[in-house]
Image (tube, rainbow, N blue to C red):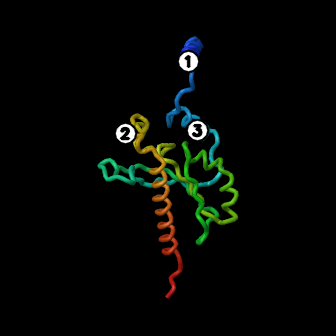
């Protein structure tokens, strides 16, 4: 048993004499990564003509606490240039950054949308870009960051897509010729 303890002490002694290295800073949402995407957004404007929309989204889809009914506005982009009645809707669910940057740099959807005559929708992820539930205070505390999770984000996407489909259907029904 003594040789194991001696070896362990030797390893600790060697580690203690090594110079301290500067470790990489911890990733915190909205810090430098978000800022670099903001710079890229300004540098590369979207190449697609799209309409910017804001959807009133609830803060918390799963609880009934007083703060859960707070509304924030989730940004989304819609491109309907090629779309026609009965064609599919292609949805890009946002990443950790401004949705306009992703829309400008997502070639695959832009390439196939005309072939399918699809409606393109790019939805910004909560807590990124302009979709900040608590404005500039969104990253200030664990309480506000508790609403930044995949379950809430997926519920945001589902609610927005369902609303969009419903409104498109209503719009189509109102604009279609009446059959007597």
- Mark 3 and mark 1: Cα distance apart in space: 46 Å
Q: Which residue is the extreme one toward the bottom?
A: 180
Say whether disc 2 or disc 3 marks the residue closer to the N-terminus.
Answer: 3
Q: Hey, which quadrant is residue 42 in on the image?
A: top right
Camera-side residue: 22 or 17? Answer: 17
Question: Relative to 77, is 41 above or below?
Answer: above
Residue in view at x 64 percent, y 53 percent: 48
Closer to the observer: label 3 or label 1?
Answer: 1
Count the labels in the image.
3
Q: Give the residue at the far front of this rendering.
A: 1
Query: For this view, does 28 lie left or right of residue 56?
Result: right
User: Which residue sits at x=42%, y=54%?
Assistant: 56
Report if residue 19 is visible in the image: no
Residue 167 position, x and y percent, is 47, 66
To which residue does mark 1 refer? 8
Q: Is residue 175 visible?
A: yes
Q: Position of residue 6 (x, y in %)?
A: 56, 14
Vertical arrangement, residue 9 with respect to residue 145, above or below = above
| Residue name at image x 55 percent, y 49 percent | 94
Mark-to-mark CA distance, 2 and 3: 25 Å
Q: Would you name the residue on which mark 3 appears?
A: 37
Secondary structure state at the residue bearing disc 3: helix
Secondary structure of the residue carrying tag 1 is helix
Would you call the spot at circle 1 few (<14 residues within 10 Å), some (14-19), or many (20 or more)?
Answer: few
Q: Residues within 10 Å of mark 3 (few under 14, many from 20)?
A: some
Front one among 27 and 97: 27
Label annotation for residue 143: 2
Of pointers 3 and 1, the one earlier in the residue sequence: 1
Q: Which one is in front in this view, the residue at disc 1 or the one at disc 2?
A: 1
* Position in image of residue 176 (x %, y %): 53, 77
Which numbered circle lies on residue 24?
Answer: none
The part of the image, by quadrant, that contains residue 38 is top right
């Amino acid at each position: 048993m003594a040789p194991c303890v001696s070896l362990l002490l030797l390893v600790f002694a060697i580690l203690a004499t090594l110079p301290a290295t500067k470790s990489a800073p911890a990733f915190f949402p909205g810090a430098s990564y978000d800022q670099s995407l903001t710079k890229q957004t300004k540098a590369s404007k979207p190449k697609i003509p799209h309409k910017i929309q804001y959807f009133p989204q609830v803060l918390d889809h799963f609880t009934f606490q007083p703060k859960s009914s707070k509304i924030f506005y989730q940004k989304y982009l819609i491109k309907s240039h090629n779309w026609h009645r009965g064609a599919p809707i292609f949805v890009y669910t946002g990443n950790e950054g401004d949705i306009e940057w992703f829309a400008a740099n997502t070639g695959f959807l832009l390439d196939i949308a005309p072939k399918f005559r699809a409606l393109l929708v790019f939805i910004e992820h909560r807590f990124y870009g302009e979709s900040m539930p608590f404005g500039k205070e969104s990253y200030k505390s664990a309480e506000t960051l508790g609403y930044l999770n995949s379950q809430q984000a997926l519920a945001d996407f589902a609610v927005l897509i369902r609303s969009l489909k419903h409104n498109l259907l209503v719009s189509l029904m109102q604009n279609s010729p009446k059959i007597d």
